[in-house]
Each structure stands twice: as structure tokens, then as C-alpha cells.
Amino acid sequence: MYSGMYHVLGGSLAPLQGRGPEQLKIKAIDERLRGGSVEEIIIATIDRGGRSYSRVLSKLLKPLGVRVTRIGVGIPVGADLEYADEITMMKAMEGRRDL
């Protein structure tokens, strides 16, 4: 279903705790995009702030010239992707939307 690379940001945005975009591994995405082979970035955030987090990421990533999407329904809020079954993940990938 999915043939690509993963990039783990290493945390989430938490402005009240002093964690903004600059504390995450977002600059490393820019380095990976320089190769020119990336066509789409799929955001799969699962924490409660995931929607606002994905909007911030989208604003940072869209100027880099790639399609930015978010996985669709099927993954419960607060769930760990490690425990999602194959069918649920497939449906979430199929239902992804542009941001």
C-alpha cells in the first residue's frame, strides 16, 4: 500500500512547554527534499493537538513544493500507530486529505 520513507519529528508542538517547530526535526525534512524525489508528505499525528499541529506543519512544508496530506479516519485520537492493524492503516492512508 505505501512505498516510501518515514521521517519522525521527535515530539509534538507544545508552546506552553516551550516546544515550537524549531525544537523538532523539521529542518531535516528540507534536507531530504533537496534530492527532488519527494512528491508527497503524509502527516500522521495522533495526539490531541494533531489537527493544529498538522496545519502548522503544512504551512511550513507547502512552500517547499510538495503535496502535504493528512491520514484519514480510522486511527483513534491518542492511539499509538504501533498497535494499529494493517486494514485500519490502509484505510487511513486511502482516506488522506490535502491540507
Image: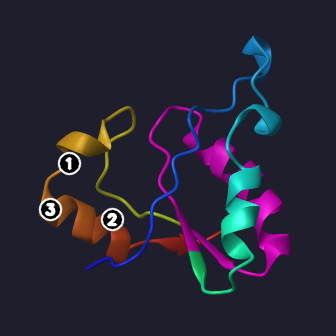
Q: Residue at x 81, y 58 (%)?
A: 60
Query: Which amino acid type is shown beneath numbered disc 3?
Result: Glu
Q: Secondary structure at mark 1?
A: loop
Query: Which amino acid type is shown beneath numbered disc 2?
Result: Ala
Q: Which residue is mark 2?
A: 92
Does residue 86 appear to the left or right of 63 in the view shown?
left
Does residue 47 appear to the left or right of 69 in the view shown?
left
Q: Does the magenta segment cover residue 59?
A: yes
Residue density around tag 1, few if under 14, some if 14–19, many if 20 or more, within 10 Å: some
* Magenta residues (range): 41-69
| C-alpha span from label 3 to label 1 | 7 Å
Q: Which residue is mark 1?
A: 84
Instruction: Give the quarter of the image for residue 95.
Output: bottom left
| C-alpha span from label 2 to label 1 | 10 Å
Instruction: Give the quarter of the image for residue 12.
Output: top right
Q: Are marks 2 and 1 in contact (CB under 8 Å)?
A: yes
Q: Does the magenta segment cover residue 58?
A: yes
Q: Nearer the viewer, residue 94 or 57?
A: 57
Q: Which residue is mark 3?
A: 86
Instruction: Give the quarter of the image for residue 18.
Output: top right
Q: Are marks 3 and 2 in contact (CB under 8 Å)?
A: no
